[in-house]
Image: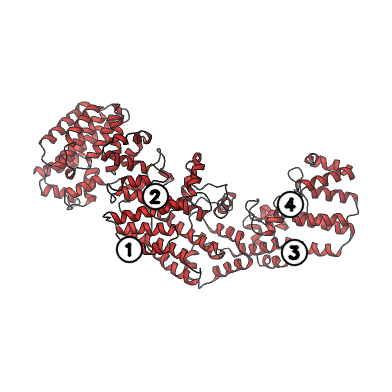
Amino acid sequence: MKAIFRKYTLLISLIIIWKFAGSCYYEPFEMNRVCLFDPETSIVSDYLRPFFYTNDLLYDNSVIDWKHIPEENINEWSDYFKGKVKKEDIKKTVYRTSLDDLIELHEVVLGNKKKKYLDNELARYIIKNKNVLISNYLIFAKRTEQLLGEGDPWYGTNYNTSALNDLIKQAKEKVKTSNDKMMMQRYAYQAIVIMRYLKQNLQAEEYYNKIFSDIRKKDESILKYWALSHVASCQHLLGKKRDSQLNFVKVFANCHAKKFWAYQQINLKYIKLLGHDATKEEYYNIKLYEQFRNPGRALAGLRAVVSHNPNSDLFITLMIRELNKIEDWLLTPKFTGSSPAIAYWNMQKEKTLQENWNSDFEYLDRFIQFTENTLNKYKIEKKGLWALMLAHLCYIHKQPEKAFKYLKIAEKNIDNDKEKSQIKYTKVLLKIITAKKIDEKFEKETWNIINSIVKEGKTSYKKREKFSDLMLALHQTYHKNKMYVKSAMFLQKIIGYDYYDIFYYLDKFASEEQVKEFIDICENKNKSKTEEFLLKEYKYDKNRYLDLLGTIMLRKDDLKAALKYYKEVPDSFWTKEYSYAYYLNRDPYIYFRNVFYVNKRYNDIYINKAYFVNSLIDKKNKYEKSKGNEKAKLAIELGNAYSNMSYEGRSWYYLAYIQGYLFTEYNDFINIDYRTNLKAIDYYDKAQTFAKDKNLQAQILFYLSGIQTKKEAKKSIVKLKTDYTENYNRYLKTCPDIKYY
């Protein structure tokens, strides 16, 4: 969950309770999807981030989510210079140098000027090698950029058409005379870009086919696919839908920088129809694209393309994408208690999705078999990554022996730091499902791994989400073992939770002894390393937990024990902290009945829970000693107090920190009495027994009708109307709803 919570609001409670109770009131979207296998584990994935399994980029109008634009152009220049020039200097010269400065550099290369380029390796390289070819091209590209930038790119107007057409001629001439394959393609690309913006669509298509169709694969520049993305746009305007769509798919499959643009231009329904008469390469590209648009099971599609190149960046990304889907389908419900995120991405297919969930483990089994077969059948280059995927899949499938086997293979074939980090996550998860006992030994072993993850340093928000999900897995592990104190502490490290949420969690699940244990840990100067890490940023408020201890006992009606805890809390706490002064500033011994009969009698002395409980003890003592109408009046006051402490009462804050049925499934006392007023009804019934005065008897019937079940309330109102008609008519004026009984 994102950090969207605010202090002591109903929204906090909605989200907190949903996490543990699986409430239908809160829908888990992308921020709640469990993802414990980092899709960036593959070292190539930086360019493919927009295509990971995620709700953020599932739809056509998605916003691109890249740290930076793929640098394949800069990488190609770097390869051209055989790594002798720093990429940063190439980027500076290509993208951030003005036309005037490039012209000056050219003059230096020609020997017409002298200038030392001490801060730019590329400039020095060009000068040293007297490479006029490169300096000329850089000037040409910058002129093209400037002239196209002067026009209106949306409407294709206000261009200096004459100057741009002249550049097309120059570019074509360079292509004819150049013996340098890369520079030839670069000039051809510049010509095609200009043609596109001048709406010379047919010329652009024809020129692309003329120049690039004969380029051998080993000589291809990445700009071939940059040019093809422009040609595909021209073909679209020419009405050549089939050619345009197939070329966009080709760009998607071969070019990182233009991949997202191509992704958005492709019509999935249309492109599927082209597969039956497509070439082998076109069929592969179509099938590949289909899987990136498939939010459901994609195993059939993966089988269709695996033989083409299982080592390609795109295929590896698809494999991790499928793994992340399986995590969503099986781990999101397990750890959050709610449906997989996919359910909320397409509500219209809820029935189909439900049928899928019922067989997800069977699908997982088939996907594991496919992954194993691929690893064994093909010459897989990144064996460590594939073994790591299998280890994680076997963890999800609860096959720890197989998982450990693949984890060992992964450790022997680690390819990068990302894989090394992912191994740590999978190790912790495997310890969770193989631990015979969740004890101190388990805590120490998991802490050693967690600590090494923490030491990896600052990471992206997505990485922090992944760590948060690991904390969620540990939180649930302790929770299922009813170790609520440690479970609560892990909440502090889950994104979106804060110190309020730990309090609410302990309020919901912890016993008196467990709350005391939590207090002891917070105040212990010799915490375990895990405890110290989890509570490092926790804002501990002892008085709040003393209040909780008192409230736990008050719910049990153990007034003496409650008073003992409340007395440890300073008086100023009740009036200045949290919401006590707002919710407990009315006299709880006065009856109120909904908006028509509201208890508006304010009395700040009852804000102090110690004062209230002490007064309750005193009233009970007086009740035991009194007789007749006096005993009846005291019973009425006690009934009023317990009624006001219930869900619909004016002083519900004595027993619950959140008002409402949904948020009060704490224990039997809350479930029964907080909702149904059993104690209040019991005291009113006793009052009826002792009351001798008719007005008092009528009053008790009226009070009872406000908290009884509908059936019982009807009996009380009928009796009130029949036996105490005058009183009934008086109550009817202040509470007209009784006439409906």
Identified by mark 4, the residue type is: Tyr
Image-based side of 522 in relation to 105, left or right: right
| Of labels 3 and 4, the one closer to you | 3
| Of labels 3 and 1, the one closer to you | 1
| Of labels 2 and 3, the one closer to you | 2
Identified by mark 3, the residue type is: Asn
Q: Residue at x 27, y 56 (%)?
A: 381
Q: Callout 2: 10 Å neighbours few (<14), some, many (20+)?
A: many
Q: Earlier in the sequence, mark 2 or mark 4?
A: 2
Identified by mark 1, the residue type is: Ile
Disc ID at residue 602: 4
Disc ID at residue 322: 2
Q: Callout 1: 10 Å neighbours few (<14), some, many (20+)?
A: some
Image-based side of 415 in relation to 628, left or right: left
Q: Residue at x 52, y 56 (%)?
A: 497
The residue under label 3 is 614
Q: Earlier in the sequence, mark 1 or mark 4?
A: 1
| Of labels 1 and 4, the one closer to you | 1
Disc ID at residue 409: 1
Q: Earlier in the sequence, mark 1 or mark 2?
A: 2
Q: Residue at x 49, y 44 (%)?
A: 353
Return the x and y of residue 233 as percentages of the image width and height.
Answer: 29, 32
Return the x and y of residue 440 as percentages of the image width and height.
Answer: 49, 71
Q: CA distance from mark 2 to mark 3?
A: 62 Å
Q: Earlier in the sequence, mark 3 or mark 4?
A: 4
Label 3 SS? helix
Q: Residue at x 52, y 57 (%)?
A: 498
Identify the residue at the far bottom of this view: 526
